[in-house]
Amino acid sequence: MIKELARHRELLQMEYNFERDTFRKETQTMGIGRKVKRGDCWFPITLGQGRYNSLNRFTVEVFRQQDEDISHNFEYGKPVCFFYQNGNGEVTYLATLGTVSYAEDERMVVTLPSQDALLSLQGKNWLGIQLYFDEQTYRLMFDALDAVINAKDNRIAELRDIFHTSAPLHKLTMNPVGFPWLNPTQEHAVNEILRAKDVAVVHGPPGTGKTTTLVEAIYEVLRRESQVMVCAQSNMAVDWISEQLADRGLNVLRIGNPSRVNDKMLSYTYEKQFESHPDYPELWAIRRSIRQLYNTAREKRGASFHQKINRLKDKANEIELRIRQHLFEQNRVIACTLAGAGNPLLTGEHYHTVFIDEAAQALEAACWIAIRKADRVILAGDHCQLPPTIKCYDAEKQGLAKTLMETIVSNKPQAVSLLQIQYRMSETLMHFSSEWFYEGKVKSAPTVKYQTILELEKPLEWIDTSSIENAEEKFIGDTYGRINEAEATLTVHILQELIGKITPRRLLDERISIGIISPYKAQVQKLRCMVKNHKDIKPFRNLISINTVDGFQGQERDIIIISLVRSNQEGKIGFLSDLRRMNVAMTRARMKLIILGNSATLSHHTFYKKLYEHIIRRTSSPGDTPLP
């Protein structure tokens, strides 16, 4: 068991080395334009207002001037660096580093080390910003793993042994609690959480109400405990569950800033609640006095100056500590990302229960950052959907992708509750995924079982591109993927036909949503550009989302169109062979799913062969010729 965790640490070191070395190499060799298209860079940018925020950190606004239609990867907590380009096109990186405080489509706020750091950026023409190597998150994961590996005679050692060995799982004896508004499998899952002394797992396939179950469980646990910590791998997932908990009437303290910047989400954040505290104006006045003293007494700083500064700092620290203590006391739910659980604000904090959503997308090391602060853990997710993002192929293949949730599911199956009724898809759309991934146990609720977008319309279609002229894949780059221009053209044509069938009036009146998914970023960018410039589709652009599989995780649309891109005689399908990604893509649709793909190429893989045959059988009329 210790060997297993030590091996996990070695693989994490491989991932760290690979990502660090790749960042250095790409910084030196990759062009700015490609970094922009990948979403890792804004160029050129302009700087806006610089100011101290309520937590006394200096921030600056950053605005991008071009490529607004390209989605970006900037979000709270990610480190960034700055650069500028001279007239000869030479790029110079500046020593100034920052951290994203929050980011919108065309504007972000970046925390800088000091006010002086802004001076190094001002006056530079053709200034840019890009993501930097995330050293801090790796340090937190390594520290957490080391603590778990070396733990002895404490709760962390007990949990480690329960998760990884045959050490017994403990449960409380209690009468089941009834929740008439939940379905039987959801009710069972909540009761299993209440009974768990060590760990419980909620396995939530697509559309089965995992968040609903988790919110109910958190609400019920808080009838027995004063406070809980709720974490997830991504900021977006933390935002979503925080919003649901707040709507349920619980006081939520969000450590970190939301991925969606609006008044409702910001009101949960520590920063916003801090500056809304009645004692904050006094603290702000003291901090302003300190800055003014430093600015006006640059040369004459004798003993009296330092005494005055120290008195003001002591008073500021006293008020800040008082505000912090009050915020933690008045909020029942402390919400953050797994990396955010290592925030200095949470130093010394401990919770009886930690809930980890998206647990199947998180590295085991990241989960331990949060688990170290708790006595028991509740994991929720679906290991049949997206895995953790790992950049080092060797580390992934050697086992780094195996999550703590997967370990517990295989080692302690009695801790797992499978949600089995889904409320998103018709039975036709759900059937194949249920059979292939969930042993046929997931069924459609009666309310959605027969839903369809149009009478007599086939809810499930495979458009075979094998006979289409020039429908060939082209390789763009290692990290940018592949493109199939003819398939993209056909995708847009099908979208246009759908709009005509449904009728523009109904589409707008009923706000029918359409998602276009491709596993490859290059295809996504191509499709976005084509849809943006298509005059007949333009009026409906706000109803149409185009993104990668990862970008659609946790979302749903009335209609989904999937462009699989791969088309070659060798039957090579690359990372499409990670079937969990396809499971995500297929299960986003509520009423209609259209897959575009070369059946000759994809049918080399058993999954796609079975899927293609399943769809053809479902869509063939009685007189059609059966498959050989």
Image: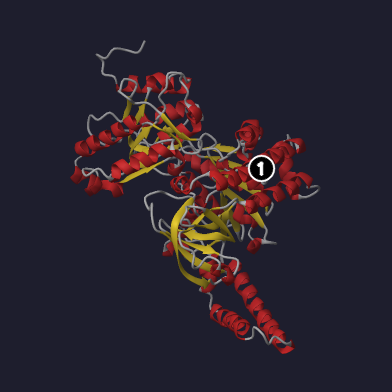
Residue sticking out furthest to the top: 628
- Give the quarter of the figure containing the N terminus: top right
On screen, residue 43 versus residue 327, left or right, reads left
Asked whether 461 or 250 is in front, the reply is: 461
Give the quadrant of residue 393.
top right
Q: Give the residue at mark 1.
A: 17
Q: In which quadrant is the C terminus drawn? A: top left
Q: Quadrant of residue 432?
A: top left
Secondary structure beneath label 1: helix
Q: Can the viewer see residue 169 in this picture?
A: no
Q: Nearer the viewer, residue 573 or 64?
A: 64
252 lies above or below 616: below
Residue 515 position, x and y percent, is 35, 41
Residue 343 percent across, percent down from the top left: 63, 59
Residue 131 sits above or below residue 13 on the image = below
Residue at 50% across, 56% down: 129
Residue 227 point in image, percent of width and height: 60, 60
Q: Nearer the viewer, residue 558 or 291?
A: 291
Residue at left 25%, top 30%?
457
- Residue 318, how many percent across, how many down? 66, 78
Image quarter of residue 287: bottom right
Identity of the residue furthest to the bottom in this view: 304
* Residue pictured at 47% horizontal, 54% vertical: 88
Q: Give the amino acid at mark 1.
A: Asn
Vertical placement of 32 versus 387: above or below?
below
